[in-house]
Image: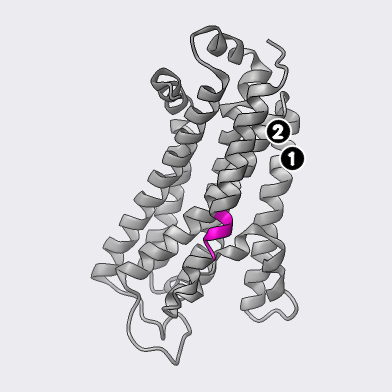
Amino acid sequence: MFSIPLFKQSVKSNWVMWSAITGVMTVLCIQFAALEMTRPLLFQIFYGMMTTILPGIYVLVTSNKLIAGQVDRGSMAYVLSTPIRRETVVITQTVFMTLSLVLMFAVETVAHILINSSNPVSFALLGYKGMAGNITSNMILEVNISAFVVCLAMAGVCMALSGIFNSSKYSIGFAGVFVGESILVNMLSMFGKLGVGGLKNFKYATICSFYDYEKILFCDSKWINGMIIPVMIALVAFAIATIVFKKKDLPL
């Protein structure tokens, strides 16, 4: 049910994209956490927007390359000519997508924890005047876990679309609408938090509504309950990708 050669091929084909997105996200995190000018916007801009925008771009491009792109180019015919079952292909690509996102967020999280350990950000600096103390390493870890789970749900939907369509233009088109809507609506809701009236409730029109870093900062354990739905979305979407790809006709 898992192909090591296919997994290695996926790593080889996508490591440049992964490295670029991970590098940019980590550098931005370090900048927002370390520079006095940007530290007040660490959560509003970086964790509010960048932790969904950058992984969202990676998920959009990579999910298409993992399944639909290979069908479209004809390379899937070579993959399936070997003793690899269709469900093995989807499971292997799902594992790759999941592990690559885990590693992406792990690199950024470790970088932020190291920066915060030497120069912690206070709640007062972030604009939470009624709260004392500084951001802790545990908070940083929980915020990134929350962001990762939501991005994993986006990845699941994109992988399902990649498994449904044989053409990249349809796979990346529908996935682009989904990811674009999720990111843009989330950005509008963030402007609502910055004081633009009427935009704060926009977050409920996107999957990103399950990602609420303020609950973690306020030590509200309900953020964990908010992860149940995106986890279910991811599991169902990955299952759909496997079932549909296994049964559909392929232009091989």
Which residue is rendered at x = 69% and y = 67% of the image? 204
Which residue matches tag 2?
A: 171
Q: Magenta span covers which residues?
A: 226-230
Q: Is residue 227 magenta?
A: yes
Residue 213, position as x, y percentages in the image: 49, 70
Direction left: furthest residue: 118
Looking at the image, is 68 positioned above or below residue 123?
A: above
Looking at the image, is 195 positioned above or below residue 9?
A: below
In contact (CB < 8 Å): disc 1 and disc 2: yes
In the picture, measured across the screen, residue 185 lies left or right of residue 107, that is: right
Which kind of residue does numbered mark 2 sit on? Ser
Residue 227, position as x, y percentages in the image: 52, 61
Residue 212, position as x, y percentages in the image: 54, 69
Q: Identify the disc placed on residue 12.
A: none
Which residue matches tag 1?
A: 174
Q: Looking at the rendering, in which quadrant would you find the C terminus?
A: top right
Q: Is residue 58 magenta?
A: no
Secondary structure mostly seen in the magenta stretch: helix
Q: How many numbered callouts? A: 2
Which residue is rendered at x = 53% and y = 48% of the image? 152
> Dot 2 surroundings within 10 Å: few (below 14), some, or many (20 or more)?
many
Which residue is rendered at x = 40% and y = 82% of the image? 123
Q: Disc 1 on helix, strand or loop?
A: helix
User: How far apart, in angstroms, are the residues tagged by discs 1 and 2?
Assistant: 6 Å
Q: Nearer the viewer, residue 198 or 45?
A: 198
Which kind of residue does numbered mark 1 sit on? Phe
